[in-house]
Image: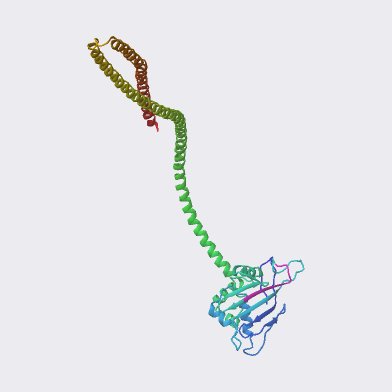
Amino acid sequence: MSSSKDKGRPERVYIKRLNLRGFKTYAKETTIEFDPTLNTIVGLNGSGKSNCLLALEVCLSWRSFSGEERKQMVHEGTAKLLTAYIEAIFDNRKKKDGTRPILGFDKDEVSLKKSVGEKKEETFVDGKVVNKKEYEEILESMGFSKSNPYYIVRQGKISELTTMDDAKRLDLLREVAGVRSYDEKRGNADNTLNEADERFLGISENIETINSRLKELQQDEKELKDYNVKHRTKLALEYTLNEKEWSHANAKVSLLSSKLRELGQEREEKEREHQSARSRIADEQRKLDAATAEQEALATELEQLQNKLEQVVRDHTSKQLELGEAKKNLTSTNSAKQSLRTELQELQQQIQTEKSALETDLKPKAIEAESEHGVEDQKLNQLTSERDALLAKQGRSKQFN
């Protein structure tokens, strides 16, 4: 079996053999050899002559088969088969000019294989699985045209050709020669040309509209450029102004931070001074309390001395009374009188001594106690003033926190 090709391409591609298994009546694996010249298949009815031609048609077909069609292709016998395959081996030996009939395959044989089953259909080229598009491209390269399905002529087509009228016969011959495909292409080209003319008119109108719009856009672009220049100038001025304001604010913040730190340090110093003043006040208060206690002790002692002095005065008075009594009795004896005088002198001297001793002991202590009390009062007033001043400063410093 062969197929014709255009000028400049290989004239014929020969099928060397056909391998079948599980297809229709070919349950077992079967190989059919073909000759490059003329081949004739003869046999009894039901021996598989038509199935051999159908296998070639399926293997070289462009169409996809339905699940029911694929199911009918699989052999139905005692041993139920799930799939069948058809494999056509093509002769691809080099010609005299060194080229091969099937381009892209540098080998003497090229196989096309289809595996069909109820659920799927697979295509193979030289044992490798390929998709439908790649399989069709291989068929095209071998000269099997999708637009001319008459590379296989079914039984009855020759007799039908002899009995049909001239118009149908001419259409058939044009289809076999591939002219109809060119007519279809020409019609498609005319339609494409008409569509192109219509699109050209539409494009011309669109171009005019676009040119008009382009002028508007150019004017808008000019205005936009002016706007962008002014906008950039505005942004630059705003940036410069903001930079200056930020620098000024930053400097002000730095100054305020410095002042705040200084006030914080001053506050801490004042708090330390306040604490120290509190300590001094506490010390002075303790000293004042000690001086007060000492003053009270001196006052008690002074009271005791005064009581003692009063007792001495009472004794002196008593002695004077006794002396008066003695004077009345002076006539008693001179010795008693002399004795009384001596005793009186001794008492007077004792009174004078006790008085001098009291004045010597109590007066300096009283003066010293009064002086110390006055000094302590002055210190207390001074410390109180310092505390009030520190509290006032501390209140001002809290305003900045």
Most extreme residue toward the bottom is 44
Q: Where is residue 188 in the image (x, y as percent from the top left)?
A: 53, 64
Q: Does the magenta stretch include residue 106?
A: yes
Question: Quadrant location of residue 51?
Answer: bottom right
Q: Which of 64 and 355 is in front in this view?
A: 355
Q: Nearer the viewer, residue 89 or 300?
A: 300
Q: Is residue 88 above or below residue 381?
A: below
On the picture, is 22 further left or further right than 314? right
Q: Where is residue 295 in the image (x, y as percent from the top left)?
A: 35, 23
On the picture, is 344 further left or further right than 401? left
Q: How many marks?
A: 0
Q: In this view, does 73 lie above or below 346?
A: below
Q: Pick the quarter of the image with the C terminus.
A: top left
Q: Position of residue 386 (x, y in %)?
A: 38, 24
| Residue 163 visible at all | no
Q: Which of 73 and 237 is in front in this view?
A: 237
Secondary structure mostly seen in magenta is strand
**Residue appearing at x 66%, y 77% in the figure:** 87
Q: Position of residue 127 (x, y in %)?
A: 67, 73
Q: In this view, does 103 lie above or below 118?
A: above
Question: Quadrant location of residue 80?
Answer: bottom right
Q: Pick the quarter of the image with the N terminus.
A: bottom right
On the picture, is 95 further left or further right than 285? right
| Residue 172 visible at all | yes
Q: Which of 380 and 345 is in front in this view?
A: 345
Type of colouring = rainbow
**Residue appearing at x 63%, y 81% in the figure:** 53
Question: Quadrant location of residue 395?
Answer: top left
Q: Which segment is the magenta one?
A: 105-114
**Residue appearing at x 66%, y 88% in the figure:** 43
Q: Does the magenta stretch include residue 117?
A: no
Most extreme residue toward the front is 333
